[in-house]
Image (tube, rainbow, N blue to C red):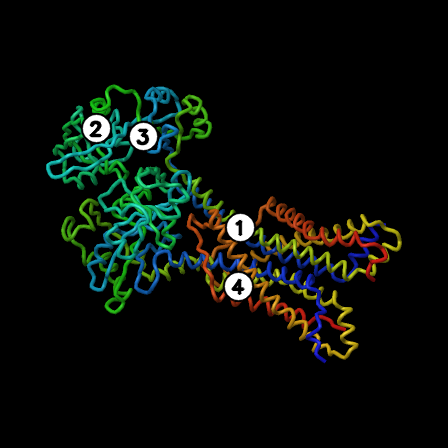
Amino acid sequence: MRILRFQYLSRRRILTLAVTVMLSSMLFFTTAISLLGFYRGFNAYLGEGEDVLVVYDKGSSTPFTGLIPAHLAEKISMVNGVLASSPEVIAPCIVRGESVFLRGIVPEDFFKLNELKMIKGEAFELSDAYSAIVGRNVAERLKLKLGEALLAHGILADRYVELRVRGIYDSQSFLDDEILAPIYVGQWLRGTDYGHVTLIRVKIDRRALSPATVLEVVAEESSGLTHSSPGGGRPLEEPIIPRVTVRFRAEYVGVEEATRFMKSYMERYGVTRESLLTLSIMVFLFSSATIATASEILVTQHAGEVKVLRSLGASKKLLKMDILAKLLPWSTAATLAGIAIAVATLTVIQGCGCLRVLSHTVPVQLDPLVITLSLALALLLSSISVIKSEIL
Amino acid sequence: MSSIALRLLFRKGGTASSILMIALLVSVLSSTQSIINYVNLQSETLGKLVHTGGTYLILSRNSTSTVDSRVEGGLTAKLGNLGYVKRVVPQKILMATIITNASSHTVRVRYVHDVLEFLEGLGAYLNGTVPKSQTEGCMGELLARMIHTDVGGEVLLDIDGKQLKVRVVGVFRSQTQSDVELLTSMETAEIFQGGSDAVSLIEFSLREGVDSREALNQIALLLPGDVKVVQVQRLREFVQQTNTQTLVFLRAWSLAVYAAIATASYMIAIKLVTESSYELAMLRALGIKRRLVFALVLAYTTTAAFLGSILGVAIGTVGAQMASTALRWLLPNVDLAPFIEADQAVEAVSLTLVSSILGCVYPALRLSRIRYMEQPL
């Protein structure tokens, strides 16, 4: 008996089930992609790869608020195997009524770590005291044009700074949501002196140097073993910044791979890739009761047709397998449609500026693992619902 | 009759699972909301720990920069007469070309009435002295380093072709943008601009203990319409905005959840119609009208949604609290204490009801349109 040829399932009723599967997949995908996008974006915030290290303040509760001695950047840059040492000051501020992060940098060092594509204008030099370059997203959000002035209001200090937009850049990273300015501008807005920076990013040659060696340099510097007299040695980056040597305790300064550094901050709040995926799966499973009910109803609604087929000799198992075979392509299509709608919705939400965390746009990236999980969960759930249904 | 009919439908076996179906979806929303609430509260609390300065600027409303801004200088006296205003510093800011023996640089020049008072306000360190004549000025340390000059050095100031030789009598470090500026007296500005009363901006601060909102309202009454008052340090605004960003995303995401709730309600209504066909046919046989059939399906689904939403808010909040407690046991560094506000709970219940009504209207309407003879048994 080849019952597969009977089209006894109503298309309209299957469609109802498909819409349910689609909505559940959409919900799961939206949750997983936005949460993982946030996680991935913040992990890559200070650079990716094992060769990028961060020298940071261990006592700081966020990656943006720590303070470490600036002169460490110069000491570290002198170590063999260090390719770049970029001192950076991250200062939250308000520009044109919008919250934004301004990063004070030494351009020469920063550009060794991050290659920026200038869309308009040009980069600045350390001596361009009134200049800033802005990320593509910030320029769009704040409607900033080349040559325009921007007044940055401090958050952590009672200060303001007026700058001119010298260039607009594209980095395809979280940097697109920031303003880059000379390091001392960041120090003014952060409310710190010229002797401190938020962190130092270091690019090393892994074959010649390990993070432990950098930590040793920090320890030596704190104990004064490599301390040079004021004014002696090479001045910090450019002579325009006053050289301030700050005493510090080595145990308050950490050295870690950039990605691990960001991960450790998020782990403090229980945010890991696994926990975010579990959360997304929970969302799917919570919404899966609807899929189970929809499958159950579908079988109940076709009880008459099933009875006829049973009286013609079709076994329960055969009928279940047949229903399953007929439903699985629909479930697969519905899941894929859910994924497509989720991506479209997230892209629209991102375009409207609603997909931002800490003033940084959350990237929407398709993750093969999430797609596979979405398909697997939807198909598994549909199958279990049909198999467990009561066919007379 | 209608209450008996409703009781009849609720006594069917599937009601509990229908309520649970809605509850699970609402719990997703409330648990996320409760965690975000805690994170936002934390950032607000941290924000309160930072000391906020009380400096304000008066700028012209349509200016794009402080250099373009024009504010009536007479406002300074008006502000100075107010008892709650501690310090008023009118400033003129002009871009100028500084010509030295070696090079020329475009720099910002700030003119104030009292250079010493201004530097004291910034908490600056001064090497040298303050200008005592039109041809003297103090230079920010970074600017002095950039143009390789020091105390006693001379620079040629050029603004729109008018030139003036200025002697640097002091070099200061303020840790502000003035470190890349030349600071001179208002009299020097008159050489370039004549006796214009207008200034670029007026900086003022309030006395401690003054109700800033009330004081600013009174100051606003004194000001002409073409100027604005802006606070220099805007911590609260920043915290509010970053919190709002998360809430905006939550709201956008919750649309997908409410769509799922509408679908779930559609399913509940369909399930009711399918599984209670005998009871519904019996009620029709007893003479209930079509409108009542519609009302019955609607009432059943919305009641299930209402109960489900209350249960969902409870499950979500308690679940998030239990999960965070467990997380704290496993990872002592993790600090989470999720909570939900009463208005958020009411909002979740209301929106669930709206989604539920939207979801069940079609099956209820379709059932009410079926004639008695077509009623499936």
List the residue tagged with mark 3: B68
Q: Nearer the viewer, mark 3 or mark 2?
A: 2
Considering the image in quadrants, where does the N terminus of chain A appear? Answer: bottom right
Same subunit, tags 3 and 1: yes
| Up/down of A2 relative to B229, above or below | below
Q: Amino acid at mark 2?
A: Asp
- Judging by the rendered image, the residue that carries numbered circle 1 is B250
Q: Residue at x 28, y 59 (%)?
A: A202
Q: Residues within 10 Å of mark 1 (few under 14, many from 20)?
A: some
Chain on which label 1 sits:
B
Q: Tell which tag, 1 or 2, sits nearer the viewer.
A: 2
Is residue A370 placed above or below A313 in the rendered structure? above
Alpha carbon separation for disc pair 3 and 2: 15 Å
Pointer 4: what residue? A278
Look at the image and tell me whether residue A307 can be seen: yes
Disc 3 secondary structure class? loop
Residue B324 shows in the view: no
Give me the C-alpha separation between circle 1 and circle 2. 54 Å
Q: Which mark is residue B160?
A: 2
Label 3 is found on which chain of the structure? B
Tell me: residue A371, above or below residue A392.
above
The residue sitting at the left extreme is B101
Which kind of residue does numbered mark 1 sit on? Leu
